[in-house]
Amino acid sequence: MFSYVLRRLGALIVILFGSSFLLYNLSAISTDPLEDLRLSDAQNRDYLIQALTRELRLDLPPPLRYFIWLRGVLGVFVGNPNFGLTREQQPVVEAIVDAIPTTIRLVAVATIVAIVLGIALGITSALRQYSRFDYGMTFFAFLLFSLPIFWVAVLLKQYLAIDFNDFLVNAKISPPWIIGLSTVTGFFWATMISGSRKRVLTIFAGAFLANSIFLSFISATEWLSYPRLGPIAIAILGVGIALGVTYLSVGLSDRNAVKSTLCMALIGTILYFPAQTLLDSSRPRVGILLLLIALLISGVAVSFLFSRIDRGPVIRTSIITSVLIWGLILIDQMMQAWRPFVESDDVNYRPVATIGQSTIWLSDVSFWVRVLDFAMHLVLPTLALTLISFAGYVRFSRGTLLDVLNQDYIRTARAKGLTERTVVMRHAFRNTMIPLTTIMVGDVAGIVGGAIITERVFAWQGMGTLFNKAINSFDLNLLMGVILFLSTLAILANLIADLLYSALDPRIRVGAGK
Amino acid sequence: MAKQQQNVEVIKDSGENAIFNKETEGLSQGQIVLRRFIRHRAAMISVVVLFTLIIVVYTALDWRIGDEEDPFIIPGWWRYGFEDMPELRYGADCVDGSVGCPTIDAVAFFDGDGVSLGEHPFGQDDIGRDYLALVMRGAQRSLLVMFIIGAIAATLGTVIGSIAGYFRGWVDAILMRLVDFIITVPVIIIGSVIGFHFGNKGAAFLALLLGLFSWTGLSRLVRGEFLTLREREFVDASRVAGASNRRIIFKHILPNAVGVIIVSVTLLMSGAILLETALSYLGFGVTSPDVSLGLLISNYQDAFTTRPWLFWYPGLFIIVIALCINFIGDGLRDAFDPRQRRRLSRKEKANARAMQSRSELA
């Protein structure tokens, strides 16, 4: 195993040599940084050309320049790396390190949302194979596959930012909208759950009614203008989370798990009150951490209290519940910052941002307003990236689950009388996750590359912007820095994917001879 | 009770099996695949739509063949070329004071006047060029790029993948390291580097270079396929019979791997059209004065609020093309998958039951 990893890392270095040599020469041969100067009619033209030639070592052929560059890079091994300077005389490493957090923020949220949503919908689609829901999802996924991301981005900017901001000024939902949205929701749930005609109609009517009551309530209380969860909503949502997580993880028949997760919902609601002062204090980050620790400890304690045997699943379930409730309390805190955020001069009633990664604050604002601001800037790019990448997860998880469901061990599990939930969640879903995990890890590198366009559309200053700048200003050092970073990431991701594969599936042994 | 249930299950199963068996009786593998594909409704619709689209797009504009000065012209069905600059419509001609608005009138269809195209159905751009002509030219370029990338990647991927998979050993090692070289860098980055430096040499040249870098995924798939197929008995048999390596590769193994190749190439092509639009959007793809769909969107994305047609039509063409290719790929995958069974219609199920009970009575 160890030698396998070493061998792979060795191969990584060789590959990086090769691909960097290829790309360096490709870019060097085909660019002419002097072109602008040659065409200019400045007095000191010849002098400028000479200066630039000396600076960029243009007198040497590209392969030689590559080795000069490589000598600096190889300094990594003696602890003195030199990736060169950008054309603006900034160290390349510095420029990249500055850009990484932005790109990670952009990619991480989108990836997580895409994975969770994609897998959930893909699995439902597979369980309802050849149903209307399945055909609908297939069409939807293919449609998303076919969309250019910048095209989607422009639509999102128009309808979800500009129009939605206009709507938020006076957040009244008109009756046609309520009826339309409720019909869509009704259709979604009816086709998703499906069953006999009577059942479908009941579900449709139920979802339609619930949704229209909910929307009318939101409209009447102007909740969208003054959003707030409060202890009551947190208690209700907490119970919902508790039951939902228990159902998916161990089933509602496990009374101990139900009791302990419900208890967690109660504890979460009680902790909500001290959390307010804790989170609003001068050190909100400590408050966030303390709250999480308190919830986790009480989660473990409660599950020890309620379960005697087979504690593992109960503890796991309680911990998932407590983390979700922690999220709820934080969301509530962000909602409380909504009014100051929207009313501030810098935002001026345009909460959903179309460009940039954060507002440049001219006035002094609280921690939570800043957090909310980050979140509102993330909405559109995340949505665009999610829409594009989640289609792949839907298709892939659907296909894999269908394959798994045809296996003999699934038939065995059904034959020995396990409930459908256990068969799907324990036996099928876990085996579906094996190929999915490797795909996910492999995708991360690709998504960072794909973020180039998203960054450009939404004017974020991340890796993509650096890359664009490098290529447009003939900045070979910067270009090679970005490419080296991305390709290292891609190779490492592949290595991790292979290792994960063998860790998840014991039948596969990596590096075990030919 | 449970036993009875099981019996019903068995009967139903064998009845349906009989239907499937009857359908494939006396047909070659190719015919079976073709039949399955024709039955895939979404894929068939996509084939029709795509072919219509290709014909419409490529016959829209005049073709100029021969030298620049005195070309031989094959006239297209549309009255404007993408370089013509007719008078820009504005003011009273356009309803809401916009410039170069589209004249296509679908509403008239509901009045009973029929659809009228008008002078500029898709509107005009800033300097009055007819937008329909521009979109047609853009679609021509995008389709051309797509087919060139698809053809080059398919050829290279298949050849390299089959050589690596068939000969194994050091040939395989060298070729797969080559693949690793190329895979390490995201395609969009390679595309940008290439496009930035060679984009001005024309769409076809750009596509040619992009094709040289997009075959890697396919070659891996083909190699995997070859590694399993070369161990099969029919390969041994042909080797014993004295067949050359070339014959074994092309006549015996490749036909068995063709399903994987076709499916993967269609997906590659739908990826290629999006890659081209993305590169043109970044400014590294097809450059002005030539036109591509991505370039059109990129040029007019800021015009969305005032002149949305400049944004809608090229986007619509990209989506329709990519969607068709994706559905065709899906249909092909289903057609080539031997385990795939279509869903029987209610009538066929009834027939199966009837057939079963008849045979039991007899």
Image (spheres, coloured by chain):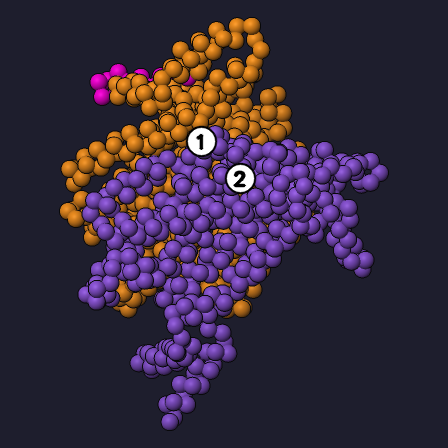
Is residue A206 within the magenta segment? no
Q: Residue at x 45, y 49 (%)?
A: B150
Looking at the picture, which amino acid does disc 1 mark?
A: Val
Looking at the picture, which amino acid does disc 2 mark?
A: Ala
Percent across and percent down for residue B93 are 82, 40
Q: Residue at x 27, y 40 (%)?
A: B177
* Number of marks in picture: 2
Image height check: is B152 above or below A277?
below
Q: Main secondary structure of the magenta part?
A: loop
Indicate the secondary structure of the residue bearing disc 1: helix
Q: Residue at x 41, y 56 (%)?
A: B262
Task: Name the residue that disc number 1 marks.
Answer: B193
Answer yes or no: are tags 1 and 2 on the same subunit: yes
As rendered, which of A212 and A29 lies closer to the eye?
Answer: A29
Q: Is residue A131 left or right of residue B10?
A: right
As rendered, which of B318 and A64 lies closer to the eye?
Answer: A64
Indicate the secondary structure of the residue bearing disc 2: helix
Image height check: is B193 above or below B173?
above
Q: Quadrant of residue B214?
A: top left
**Would you say residue A284 is visible in this rendering?**
no
